[in-house]
């Protein structure tokens, strides 16, 4: 089992998440000044005239020289004022963080819309998401999830700033190779959950945190004891309205009792995405439903006079892509060349995780499987490629844990892996693919005192969010895979 300590934390340059531009909104216009110099003629044929009017010529000449000097001096003065005064004025009007008006201390509310694929906000009317975007900061082309693009690994990466190989939740389901214990989404033993999630970081600093559903929040770990009044055990039957109202009620407490960090989780639109896929019109109902809940949240904060004080960080954990029964690779189709028993499989799709028993060399299994898949003898075989985990692309950050099985298979977007052929006809949606696939992106929208209004930033990996939250709360975070420079490039400087 992976040690409870996390050591490989600072990413190397070639593994850094996509950088965020720090271009300021203040620009200097190019100065254009045209100085007209008067010319005069001394016609040689008119020498007699010049001799007759020496005083007049002298006056004209002196006047021209003086006017030219005056013009040049004025131009120089204008240039000085423009180039030296403008930056000062620009800095004085640059956007800075806005002071709190009602709350005494910063509060961050982290909201997750499970399976909210980037682009869903354009499929139907989302007035409340639009409002946050127009008055806040948005990842212009979406939030990049970690690999694998699954619910538990990504939610825990968001609150720890760690890649799954480092925080231990490498899949929604997996096996500890040392003990043989099974991890499921109902596993709350601290041994599984490595790293330091935000609620624990907040508690370490003597502040209060509240969690209304978030993977890992029910785990009693370190200084976090999951207090009854601030920590809700997951129950999918709790209406969305009740969740929103429970969070709003925290703002009715005395100021010293209001949690500094809160989470709020909605299953939509992931549930519907799996059933009908991201392109079905029925997904619009789920999108509109969560947007309505955001409206209820915003209205409740406004009635309490704290909307502009609260930092709302709206995220999704992953995207969604359409799948269909015609895009399936069956492992039993390889049986004439190599047997892959179901007992070897920890997960099928879209992340194929294979753990051969002792006596089988993983390298030989990988070589034979790829040979057969490329041969043309397996239907859709060319859309599946298997790797030794240490040979996966480094940008996936998916090798440095013994919880990750020795063989990992990656399927192309929209394809699935199953063991046995069946007559079942199924078209729907899935996620879990390579996080470089655009359909796996979700959203990042943030609104609050330290987020610029109407600002767009380039896409980034969700491991950066941990540092954003600790910076807003003015607390020191645990070591993580995020970058120090990122938070400074996204957050407004403090006033």
Image (tube, grey):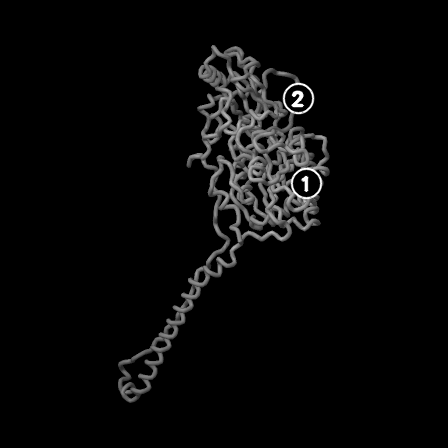
Answer yes or no: is residue 59 visible: yes
Q: Is residue 191 above or below residue 48?
A: above
Give the total number of marks visible in the rendering.
2
The residue pinned by badge 2 equals: 425
Residue 195 point in image, percent of width and height: 53, 31
> Which badge, 2 or 1, comes first in the chain's sequence?
1
Q: Quadrant of residue 186?
A: top right
Residue 344 point in image, percent of width and height: 54, 15
Q: Dot 1, how many residues are within 10 Å of its Cα: few (below 14), some (14-19), or many (20+)?
A: many
Q: Is residue 28 above or below residue 328?
A: below
Q: Dot 2, how many residues are within 10 Å of its Cα: few (below 14), some (14-19), or many (20+)?
A: few
Instruction: Classify residue 143 as left or right of residue 83.
Output: right
Mark sitting on residue 247: 1
> Mark 1 falls on what kind of element?
helix
Tag in front: 2 or 1: 1
Answer yes or no: is residue 127 visible: no
Contact between labelled residues 1 and 2, with CB atoms less than 8 Å apart = no
Q: Quadrant of residue 350?
A: top right
Q: Nearer the viewer, residue 213 or 65?
A: 213
> Mark 2 falls on what kind of element?
loop
What distance separates the C-alpha of mark 2 from that of mark 1?
41 Å
Q: Quadrant of residue 77?
A: bottom left
Residue 24 point in image, percent of width and height: 49, 52
Residue 267 point in image, percent of width and height: 66, 33
């Amino acid at each position: 089992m992976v040690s409870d300590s996390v050591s490989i934390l600072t990413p190397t340059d070639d593994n850094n998440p996509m950088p965020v531009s720090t271009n300021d909104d203040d620009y200097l216009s190019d100065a254009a000044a045209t100085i007209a110099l008067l010319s005069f003629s001394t016609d040689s044929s008119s020498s007699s005239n010049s001799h007759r009017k020496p005083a007049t010529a002298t006056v004209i000449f002196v006047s021209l020289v003086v006017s030219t000097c005056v013009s040049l001096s004025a131009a120089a003065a204008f240039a000085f004022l423009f180039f030296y005064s403008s930056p000062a004025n620009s800095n004085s009007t640059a956007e800075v963080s806005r002071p709190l008006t009602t709350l005494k201390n910063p509060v961050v509310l982290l909201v997750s819309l499970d399976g909210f694929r980037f682009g869903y906000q354009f499929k139907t009317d989302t007035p409340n998401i639009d409002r946050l975007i127009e008055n806040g900061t948005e990842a212009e082309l979406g939030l990049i999830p970690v690999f694998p693009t699954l619910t538990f690994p990504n939610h825990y990466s968001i609150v720890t700033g760690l890649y799954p190989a480092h925080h231990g939740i490498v899949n929604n389901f997996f096996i500890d190779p040392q003990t043989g214990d099974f991890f499921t989404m109902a596993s709350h033993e601290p041994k599984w959950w490595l790293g330091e999630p935000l609620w624990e970081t907040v508690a370490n600093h003597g502040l209060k945190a509240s969690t209304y559903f978030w993977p890992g929040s029910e785990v009693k770990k370190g200084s976090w004891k999951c207090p009854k009044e601030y920590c809700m055990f997951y129950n999918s039957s709790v209406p969305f309205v009740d969740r929103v109202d429970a969070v709003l009620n925290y703002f009715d407490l005395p100021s010293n009792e209001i949690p500094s960090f809160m989470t709020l989780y909605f299953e939509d639109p992931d549930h519907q995405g799996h059933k009908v896929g991201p392109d079905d019109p029925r997904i619009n109902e789920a999108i509109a439903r969560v947007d309505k809940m955001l409206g209820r949240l915003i209205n409740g904060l406004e009635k309490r006079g704290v909307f502009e004080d609260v930092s709302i960080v709206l995220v999704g954990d992953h995207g969604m892509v359409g799948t269909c029964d015609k895009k399936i690779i069956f492992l039993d189709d390889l049986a004439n060349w190599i047997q892959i028993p179901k007992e070897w499989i920890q997960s099928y799709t879209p992340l194929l995780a294979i753990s051969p028993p002792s006596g089988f060399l993983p390298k030989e299994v990988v070589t034979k499987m790829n040979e057969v898949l490329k041969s043309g003898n397996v239907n859709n075989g060319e859309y599946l490629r298997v790797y030794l985990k240490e040979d996966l692309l480094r940008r996936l950050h998916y090798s440095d844990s013994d919880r990750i099985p020795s063989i990992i298979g990656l399927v192309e977007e929209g394809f699935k892996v199953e063991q046995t052929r069946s007559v079942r006809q199924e078209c729907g949606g899935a996620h879990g693919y390579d996080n470089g696939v655009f359909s796996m992106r979700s959203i990042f929208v943030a609104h609050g005192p330290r987020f610029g209004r109407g600002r767009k930033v380039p896409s980034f990996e969700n491991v950066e969010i941990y540092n954003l939250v600790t910076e807003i709360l003015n607390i020191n975070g645990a070591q993580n895979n995020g970058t120090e420079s990122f938070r400074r490039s996204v957050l407004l400087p403090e006033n």
